[in-house]
Amino acid sequence: MRSPTPQLPLQVFIDAWKGRSFTHSRDNYIWGTVVFLPMFIVVAIMFCGLESTTCTQQGERSHSAMIHQHCFNGLQEVELRWYGSIVNDILMRLVENFTSLNSLLIHNEVSKEVWLQFITHSRCNLQKLDLCVLHDLKDNHLLAVAEKFRGLSSLRLHSCFLVTPEGLKTMVLAMSNKLEELAMLNCKVEPGLLTTLGQSVIYLRKLDLSFNNNAADKKFITMLALCNCLREVKVRGCKGLNNASVVSMFKSCKLESVDIMYCCWIDIEAVELLVWNCLRLRKIQVEESKLSEVSRSWALNKLVEVVL
């Protein structure tokens, strides 16, 4: 009697390899490929202990071709980067078939109708969501995400220009109990949102506010004083922050990783203070021009990785 086929796919990578497809089998690892035309999308699925005849599909198929259900049992992670309208089709397939998905990255424009369908009808329990350049993404979409995926621990938003500051605040309040990582890069972050973050998201460990010029010093300092669990802060390109914000970083938080690249009002002395006083610091990203010999020496002695 044959033992049941284990459902152990580890990860799915979706990448654009123009005209390429492959199948490689060695030991008990099997790589299956499904090629969608006209975009030449390759979906590579890595399995343990599955027979090659079960999960290998190869050849030219239209992007609406049926994906073999068995090959995606246990699918947990999907990344969709820059593939045009085919992303809409893939999202619909995720709605129809996959309940084990816990991490979704979309760096591509998506139809707002398809996106709402995914949110409304998906049966998965997403824990990580990363959205970039979704020009149709509005406040109601974010609120729907917050209400649907209550177990979300990581949310990353990039350049979501139609989401208002009020929409971001409502979203943060709705997700405050579980959220451990929040990124709002080049979004409309207003000072009031920082106060809401500090008061509500008590388990936040990673925060990325890069390229938000409205991140004001006073509100940022207040937020840091309330976010005791923070271990990683990125404020790259935030022109509203100065040395006082850096001092607050090592006084209020036990940070392990800091990105203060391209913050024009943060100077050499502030970087020295941060490297010396931030006892748990393991990584700092800063311009070379702001890194003195003293900072370099301290970083070397404390085994702090410096990224220039």
Image: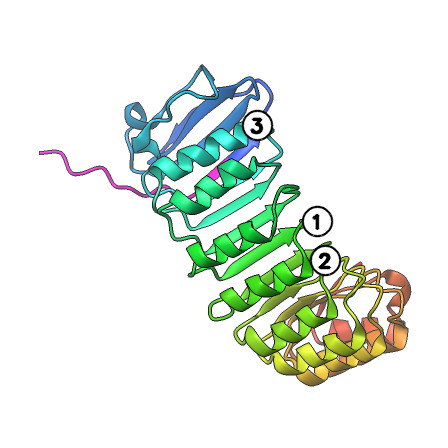
Crowdedness near tag 3: few (<14), some (14–19) or many (≥20) residues, C-alpha within 10 Å: some
- In depth, the one of 50 and 175 nearer the eye is 175
Give how far across and how far down residue 233 sits, in percent: 68, 68
- Residue 33 location (% of width, % of height): 44, 26
Direction left: furthest residue: 1
- Find residue 188 and name its label: 2
Q: Residue 161 carries which label?
A: 1
Q: Quadrant of residue 112?
A: top right
Q: Quadrant of the N terminus?
A: top left
Ranked by sequence position, the earlier of labels 3 and 2 is 3
- Residue at (78%, 78%) from the top-left corner? 218
Q: Is label 3 or label 2 in front?
A: 2
Depth check: give the residue in front, 304 or 166: 166
Per the image, the residue denoted by label 3 is 85
Q: State the extent of the magenta-drawn residues as a range.
A: 1-13
Amino acid under disc 1: Phe
- Looking at the image, residue 60 sits to the left or right of residue 304; the answer is left
Task: Tell whether 279 sits left or right of 48.
Answer: right
Asked if residue 216 is among those painted magenta in the image, a careful observer would answer: no
From what the image shows, is residue 291 above or below residue 222? above
Q: Let me know if residue 283 appears in the view.
A: no
Amino acid type shown at disc 3: Ser
Q: At which x and y percent is residue 163?
A: 65, 53
Image quadrant containing the C terminus:
bottom right
The location of residue 98, given as percent across then percent down, is 35, 40
